[in-house]
Image (cartoon, grey):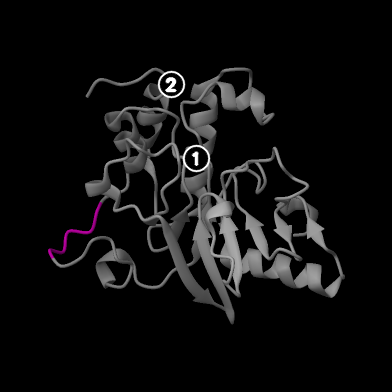
Amino acid sequence: YRRSKGIDSVIDAVEIAGAREPCERDDCDDCNDCDDCGGEGSIYLISDLHLNHADIIRTTARPFADRDIEEMNRVLIENWRGTVKDGDRIIYLGDLTYKADEETADRFLWMLSGNLTFVEGNHDKNVNRDLVGSVSDYTFEYGGYSFYCVHNPKFAPKDFSGWIIHGHTHNTRMCRYPFVNMKERTINVSCEVIGYRPVSIDTIIEAIERCRDEKRERADYLEDIV
């Protein structure tokens, strides 16, 4: 493979640790339901890593040296792999990279642990659909709650009665899209909002219930409530 600038040091570290391997069963596409995929695990969510995107460091005030994509890539991937285990499910809500070619996107995908559900974002045109099987939205129920996952919250159905989990807005429109918005019933899992590592669905529910118990209308960041 030809390696893009900013990916070399991350690849070296991940190859030492052991990269994500697909399920080898012929009838399974990393379903998380068979023993080979790890069975039932925890559910995690995150969005908008924007790997290899130098300008995102400045525009969203990420805690990395200006345009230091190697350090940003390394930290974001290590945070993911240190949180999500092989038997866990991870729902990714789009924008893995920014205008990366398919080869670079593929290399990043193989570094990620867990059984991946990939909700496509507006910058994921070059993500290999055969490798990841991306979807435009994803609905699931957990702990008595219904969740609708979509990259851009403006595309969520207006009549959905549960909670909308989204990315896309990063931390640039916090008045409208904080981590928890009780009135609009939205959850923002853009990585800048949740501490640059995947957040579990149990933690999201805990945040919702704390806001409700404390009669709070919102929690801007994950660290503000949990």
Q: Quadrant of residue 159?
A: bottom right
Identity of the residue furthest to the right in this view: 215
- Where residue 112 appears, as percent x and y from the top left, is 39, 45
Instruction: Report the amino acid beneath label 1.
Output: Glu
> Of circles 2 and 1, which is in front?
2
The reply to whether residue 147 is visible in this rendering is yes
Mark 1 burial class by Cα count in 10 Å: few <14, some 14-19, many 20+: some
Q: Main SS type for the magenta part?
A: loop
Instruction: Tell me the quarter of the image containing the N terminus.
Output: top left
- Where residue 165 appears, as percent x and y from the top left, is 58, 59
The answer to whether 50 appears left or right of 154 in the picture is: left
Instruction: Report the amino acid beneath label 2.
Output: Gly
Instruction: Tell me what residue is drawn at x 32 percent, y 42 percent.
Output: 110
The answer to whether 99 appears left or right of 170 in the picture is: left
CB under 8 Å between discs 2 and 1: no
Instruction: Tell me what residue is drawn at x 30 percent, y 21 percent.
Output: 3
- Of 218 and 72, nearer the camera is 218
User: What residue is pinned by disc 1?
Assistant: 78
User: What residue is pinned by disc 2?
Assistant: 6
- Of 188 and 12, nearer the camera is 188
User: Is 115 within the magenta?
Assistant: no
Specify the segment rendered in magenta. Answer: 22-26
Instruction: Tell me what residue is drawn at x 22 percent, y 48 percent.
Output: 130
- Marks 2/1: CA–CA distance: 15 Å
- Where residue 105 appears, as percent x and y from the top left, is 34, 34
Q: Earlier in the sequence, mark 2 or mark 1?
A: 2
Q: Residue 34, relative to residue 172: is it above or below?
A: below
